[in-house]
Image (cartoon, rainbow, N blue to C red):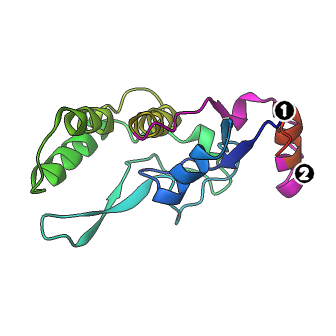
């Protein structure tokens, strides 16, 4: 029997294709043991304002060394409440019907407890569950892979550790 896995960096409010990937696999590996891409979507995304114009929404992170892995990202001290407030202010401008599920999504987005990766995993799990594509998630940082593995060797090691056939 095939065991399909996907390996992707965590994203703050991922794009639709991310969830399509979930639908096609048995297990998901959150690739958090790699360098944090500062200009990527791990910690930020564009969301529409009240006029439908894209607006950057960025998670408040501590400044960190260029080689910091995603798993070691930390919230900037004291800024989580203002980030949650930004999300609430932005979403109250949207002209949508606030169903129970949308309220739960807002509650999930504004729950900034735990680590940065905890937050990313929790919000991802909520959306996947809502879309009925929930899959088991494993953080690559928990797999105890040798630090000297890079690139495709790291990916192949993750596949072997997870028993992936596809």
Confirm whether the magenta stretch covers residue 88: no
Mark closest to the chain's N terminus, 2 or 1: 1
Give the mark count: 2
Mark nearest the camera among 2 and 1 is: 1
Residue 155 location (% of width, % of height): 82, 48
> Can I make out residue 15 in this image?
no
Drawn side of residue 67 relative to residue 40, left or right = right
Residue 151 location (% of width, % of height): 83, 57
- Is disc 1 placed on a helix, strand or loop? loop
Drawn side of residue 59 relative to residue 115, left or right = left
Mark 1 lies on residue:
1
Specify the quadrant that holds the N terminus.
top right
Residue 101 location (% of width, % of height): 24, 35
Residue 154 location (% of width, % of height): 85, 47
Mark 2 lies on residue:
153
Q: Residue at x 70, y 49 (%)?
A: 34
Q: Give the range drawn in magenta.
A: 131-155
Circles 2, 1 touching at the beta carbon (< 8 Å): no
Camera-nearest residue between 16 and 144: 16
């Amino acid at each position: 029997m095939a065991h399909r896995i996907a390996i992707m960096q965590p994203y703050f409010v991922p794009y639709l294709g991310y969830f399509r990937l979930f639908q096609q696999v048995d297990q998901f590996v959150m690739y958090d043991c790699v360098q944090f891409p500062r200009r990527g979507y791990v910690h930020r995304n564009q969301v529409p304002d009240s006029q439908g114009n894209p607006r950057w929404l960025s998670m408040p992170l501590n400044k960190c060394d260029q080689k910091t892995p995603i798993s070691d990202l930390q919230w900037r001290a004291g800024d989580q409440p203002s980030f949650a407030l930004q999300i609430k202010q932005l979403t109250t401008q949207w002209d949508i019907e606030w169903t129970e599920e949308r309220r739960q999504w807002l509650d999930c987005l504004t729950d900034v407890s735990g680590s940065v990766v905890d937050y990313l995993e929790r919000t991802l799990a909520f959306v996947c569950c809502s879309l009925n594509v929930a899959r088991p998630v494993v953080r690559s940082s928990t797999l105890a892979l040798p630090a000297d593995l890079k690139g495709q060797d790291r990916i192949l090691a993750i596949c072997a550790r997870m028993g992936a056939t596809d």
